[in-house]
Structures are given as structure tokens and as C-alpha cells.
Amino acid sequence: MIGQLTGLVSHIEGDHCLIDVHGVGYVVSASTHTLGQLPRPPEVARLLVETIVREDAIQLFGFADADEQAWFRLLTTVQGVGVRVALAILSASRPALLWQAVQAEDKAVFTQAAGVGPRLATRLLTELKAKVAKMPAPASLSGQPLAPMSHGGGGVSGAHPHGGVEQDALMALEGLGFKRAEAWPIVNRIIGETEGAGLDVVIRLALKELAR
């Protein structure tokens, strides 16, 4: 099994690149994010690699970082998500946003990817919820600190501790054009920090931060 490649980037094309390791060229499929991180040919690059062995082929999938590789493995455990769909999801959204989307039950983040319709997006949220709850929270999302999912110190939880106000605020912000996964950490934190905050207060404070 190939777990990592370090070599010259011979060329980048479409959804794959060619890595020359001591004269042997490896065709490596990757997300647009990973391909965008590669240096211009013919400079040296290092890629983490997932090797998929099938009866008729051996495929290599490359990743710029361990988070993306972990999500590739996670996504392909969902029924109906093959390696190509997993790469499409990772091309459309970074791991931190996917983590938030699962917590916020935001299908829109997944349906941005080619090959993912509403039904598959629902299955992704359902099957990933318990698995993502066992993963550590990403350090940040687009520069915003993530709100903790649980105040009890018992790890990450997928529950919505703030009930109706949180969901109503998220729906209102969605109606104003903000993505649910982007609004969720802000709303969650505001409710946690502002004891007894009503819906109007939560929306006003959230809008103030989102407008930045």
C-alpha cells in the first residue's frame, strides 16, 4: 500500500496530477483544494495517499493534509458515496465546514457537490452524525473560533442544547441569505454566553457578527 508520495509534480490536469518519484510517474486523483495547494511543475511536493485496490485497477487519491484524508475515509463509509463523490464533496467544502454542516444539519453544504442530491445529503447527515460526534472539533472555520458543542466537558455532542431559539434563529438567518453552517457556531455561542436571550436578541447579535 502507498501511504505517501514525495516527488516532482509533472503536471496537473482536471481532477488529478502526475507525481514523478525517481522516474516512476504516479497518477493521483485529488480534490480541487489539494490540487490548488500543489507547487507549479516541476517542483517537489508531498501528498498523503489513500490506495484503493480493485479487481481491475489500483487507484491513488492524494490529500494536502490529514483532515481531508480522514474525511475522505469517513465519507466513503456512507452508502451511495463512492470515491468520486467523496472527492466532489471535498472539492466543494473544506473539512471544517463539513463538520459544522453535520452538527447544524445543513444539507445545503453537501448538495453543492456534484452528484449529491437532497436524498443523498439527508443520508450523509444521518449516517455521519454519530461518527462525527467522536471526532475532535476543527480549530477554526473561516477564521471564526468554533463554539463548543457541549459545556459538560464530555466531548463533542451532536445535540442542540438550546432548543427552539437556536433553530428559529438559524431559519431566520437562512431566510436572510446566510448559510446555516456558517451561522450555527455564532448563534450557538451567543445563546451560550447570553443567558435568557430571546430570539430577537440572538438574531440581532448574530447579524452584527455575520456582517463583518
Image: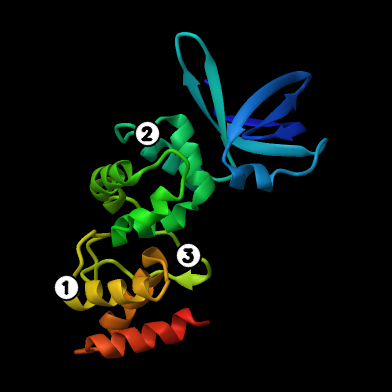
- Residue 149, relative to residue 166: is it above or below? above
Judged by depth in the image, the label closer to the viewer, 2 or 3, is: 2
The amino acid pointed to by label 1 is: Gly
Locate residue 38, reporting x and y percent. 70, 43
Height in image: 22 above or below 79? above
Q: Are marks 2 and 1 in contact (CB under 8 Å)?
A: no
Foreground of the two, 88 or 175? 175
Q: Residue 19: image x %, image y %?
A: 71, 28
Q: Is residue 110 visible?
A: yes
At mark 3, the secondary structure is strand
Judge by depth and name the residue closer to the eye, 71 or 121: 121
Query: Secondary structure beneath disc 2?
Result: loop
Q: Which mark is residue 163?
A: 1
Amino acid type, mark 3: Leu
95, above or below 196, in the image: above
User: Which labelled disc corresponds to residue 141?
Assistant: 3
> Of the residues under marks 3 and 1, which one precedes in the sequence?
3
Side (left or right) of 47 relative to 77? right
Q: Amino acid at mark 2?
A: Val
For marks 3 and 1, give the CA distance. 23 Å
* Foreground label between 3 and 1: 1
Quadrant housing residue 187: bottom left
* Residue pointed to by mark 2: 81
| Residue 136 appears in the picture as rendered | no
Q: CA distance from mark 2 to mark 3?
A: 24 Å
Check contact, mark 3 vs mark 1: CB within 8 A.
no
Q: Position of residue 136 (x, y in %)?
A: 36, 55
* Identity of the residue furthest to the right in this view: 42
